[in-house]
Image (cartoon, helix red, strand yellow):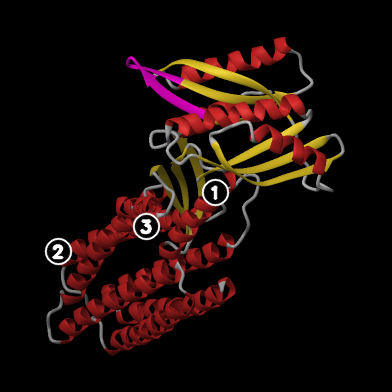
Amino acid sequence: MFIQRTKVLQISLIAIFSAFLVELIFGLVSNSLALITDSIHALLDSVVTLVLLLAAKWAIKPPDEEHTYGHGKIESLGGLIGGIAIFLIACFFIYESIHRLQSPPPSILPGMYAIIGGLYTIGIDIFRIILLRRSIKKIGGATLKADFYHAFMDLGSTLVAIAGIILVSYGLYYGDFVAALILGVLLAILSVKLVYKTAQDLTDIISPELVKKVRKISNATEGVINADPILMRKSGDTIFADVTISLRGDTSFDRAHEISSNVEKNIKKVVSNAKIIIHFEPDWEEVPLDAKILEIAKSVEGVKGVHNVSTHKTKGKMFTNLHVMVDRDINLSDAHRISEIVEQKIQENISEIEHSTIHIEPFMTVPENLNLEDRVTKRKIKTILEKYEEIKKIGRIVSLNFENILKIDIDCSFDGNLSIEKVHDLTSEIEHIIRAEISNAVITIHPEPD
């Protein structure tokens, strides 16, 4: 695609440069200031096309140590230099036109040669417009669009020049100079616009509407709470975007990565030439209190796992209970120190928590591959469960043995009228009794209503 762009720009460059030569030669022969002015415009257009050609070639160079964002700014820099040059030359022709309008009529007036030179340039401009328009539809690109606009501008200036020459042929001797003056003013205005635009590009200006669009797309992506800040800049054809999104604080890393990828895909559907970096940050405002406590506790060094997190309010004060698992080989002092750090972190991050009750438990890794069922253990567990009248029905008991660790899953039905808190207390008590009877056990009780 980039190679096709450079070929099209090469053809455009040869065409417009030939127009410059023809207009300059015929303008000098026929003494037409308007045609000479337009030939200079064609020369400057050739320079701009050359800059666009070089930019198209340099733009495909990969980023390096000195240009980590690539080389797209070269195009803007070339446009700035070209715009300044056009402005200075336009000022010269404005001055020259005013000077000649105040001088006696020239002895040699533009004639047929000047018209022929102008018609040749019109043909070249029409050829470039058709070529560039077809190429833009097929392969696109900012460089081709810029050259397309320059071709239109050159066509307009040539038509003005020919109009001045025709006025001279009808006896309006100063028509040529008036046309040159109009062209000079037109070029000055266009050059100021070009300088202004390229200078803004070099200062990393970006459309506020585009930023709003990217923010709207990001916020509309499932899982995103808010998108801010959004930093964008343009370099050549490429738009670079740094988007920071807020996600629920309890979102897993895998899910956060998935949401970030979706945001990037959605933005690229609208801004296809964008290179996007997504940053995600936790937002705890919409996260349930228990989930916040769980994540805070898990973040403490030495904590192997957290479960059974609960919060309750008494006399206007908030309290929390949680079970924290630590390495089963550490001593009580080290385990207590970890629990103190957990409590301190909860207090620092959730000011409404008055006190935290932390139950320290030994952590046991449950292996993925467990072997034969232990029937003796199953009978032991059933005996323990039968002592509880709250248990209406004992369901499946799966006891899997792996080296010195037992993985025990228990299904049992409780009275459906019992509160969740009561069921939780009972299952915690049963787990404790089973662990006292059966060492090295990892127990999971699944309560169901009877």
User: Could one spot residue 261 in this view of the protein?
Assistant: yes
Q: Residues within 10 Å of mark 1 (few under 14, many from 20)?
A: few
| Direction top: furthest residue | 333
Closer to the camera, 106 or 218?
218
The image quarter in which residue 105 lies: bottom left
Q: CA distance from mark 2 to mark 1?
A: 77 Å
Indicate which disc residue 102 carries. 2
User: Residue 381's x, y, as percent?
Assistant: 71, 36
Q: Residues within 10 Å of mark 3 (few under 14, many from 20)?
A: many
Quarter of the image where the N terminus is located: bottom right
User: Magenta region's main secondary structure?
Assistant: strand
User: Could one spot residue 307 in this view of the protein?
Assistant: no
Indicate which disc residue 365 carries. none
Task: For marks 3 and 2, give the one nearer the viewer.
Answer: 3
Mark 1 sits on what residue? 255
Closer to the camera, 400 or 335?
400
Q: CA distance from mark 3 to mark 1?
A: 50 Å
Q: Tell me which residue sits at (45%, 35%) in the image.
A: 418
Closer to the camera, 380 or 349?
380
Highlighted range, magenta = 309-319
